[in-house]
Amino acid sequence: MKQIVPSFFSSSSLLIYRLLAIFLCISPTQSTFSVKIGNDVLSQICAQTEDRNSCLKALQSNPRTASTDLYGLAQISINLANATASETRTKIKSKLGQTTDPNLYDQYLKCLESYVNAVSKINYANGRWSIKDFLALEAAASDCLIEINTCKGVTTPAWPFLPQQNDKSHLLCNIMSTVAKRLAAGNN
Ligand SMILES: *[C@@H]1O[C@H](CO)[C@@H](O)[C@H](O)[C@H]1NC(C)=O
């Protein structure tokens, strides 16, 4: 009896270890990040932003949104914010070259600075995203919002393009921040 019991236990625990090893080998691909985003979760996320409908429209403009998980959605939002902020920066730069009014020139210059910083925050956010540092990603998204607000504050709407781009850029950084918050909370 003394010999049977230990060998029974050791062989059954060996079996458990083997099953555990197999399970662990399979499970990493099924981690929390691989859950596909459904329309309900997408609506939930967008409802937490400043403009639900424009948020849905922006995210759904990328075909990858239909098949991605929350982690992938974060990068889609980073890419969207990057594209709009970069486009705005380029347009302000060319507008600046055509502006002779010194007061207006100052305002555009401040906005250019804001957008140079915003684009840099967004690209920094992308680096944080790639190492899954979601708190830093969220902080970078907040910094982006602050930069856009700075331009919003200094602008007289002498150029209709700018308020429109400010709103769009602000929303896209707001989406980034909302998705980052959700990732940071482990709420996938
Ligand atoms: C942002 O856009 C620039 C220029 O289009 C590109 O070089 C850069 O890789 C983009 N970064 C991200 C994070 O999308």
Image (cartoon, helix red, strand yellow):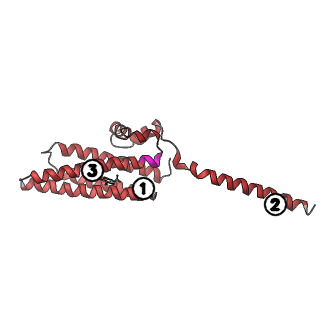
Q: Secondary structure at mark 2?
A: helix
Q: Please give the name of the residue rendered at 40% of the width and 56% of the height, measured from the top-left corner.
A: 137
Q: For residue 10, which numbered disc appears in the image?
A: 2
Distance between mark 1 and mark 2 Cα atoms: 44 Å
Distance between mark 2 and mark 3 Cα atoms: 62 Å
- Direction from residue 84 to residue 36 in the image, left or right: right
Q: Nearer the viewer, residue 170 or 115?
A: 115
Q: Secondary structure at mark 3?
A: helix
Q: Please give the name of the residue rendered at 32% of the width and 58% of the height, measured from the top-left corner.
A: 121
Q: Please give the name of the residue rendered at 81% of the width and 58% of the height, measured from the top-left corner.
A: 11
Q: Is mark 3 within 8 Å of ligand 1?
A: no
Q: Main secondary structure of the magenta part?
A: helix
Spot occupied by residue 171 in the image (x, y as percentages of width and height): 31, 45
Tell me the kind of residue under disc 1.
Answer: Trp
Callout 3 crowding tier (Cα within 10 Å): few <14, some 14–19, many ≥20: many
| Residue range (magenta) | 68-73
Q: Please give the name of the residue rendered at 75% of the width and 55% of the height, measured from the top-left corner.
A: 16
Q: Magenta span has 173?
A: no
Toward which corner of the image does residue 39 lie, by quadrant? top left
Q: Nearer the viewer, residue 133 or 126?
A: 126
Callout 2 crowding tier (Cα within 10 Å): few <14, some 14–19, many ≥20: few
Q: Secondary structure at mark 1?
A: helix
Spot occupied by residue 59 in the image (x, y as percentages of width and height): 37, 41
Spot occupied by residue 54 in the image (x, y as percentages of width and height): 32, 38
Q: Magenta span has 69?
A: yes
Circles 1, 2 touching at the beta carbon (< 8 Å): no
Figure label count: 3
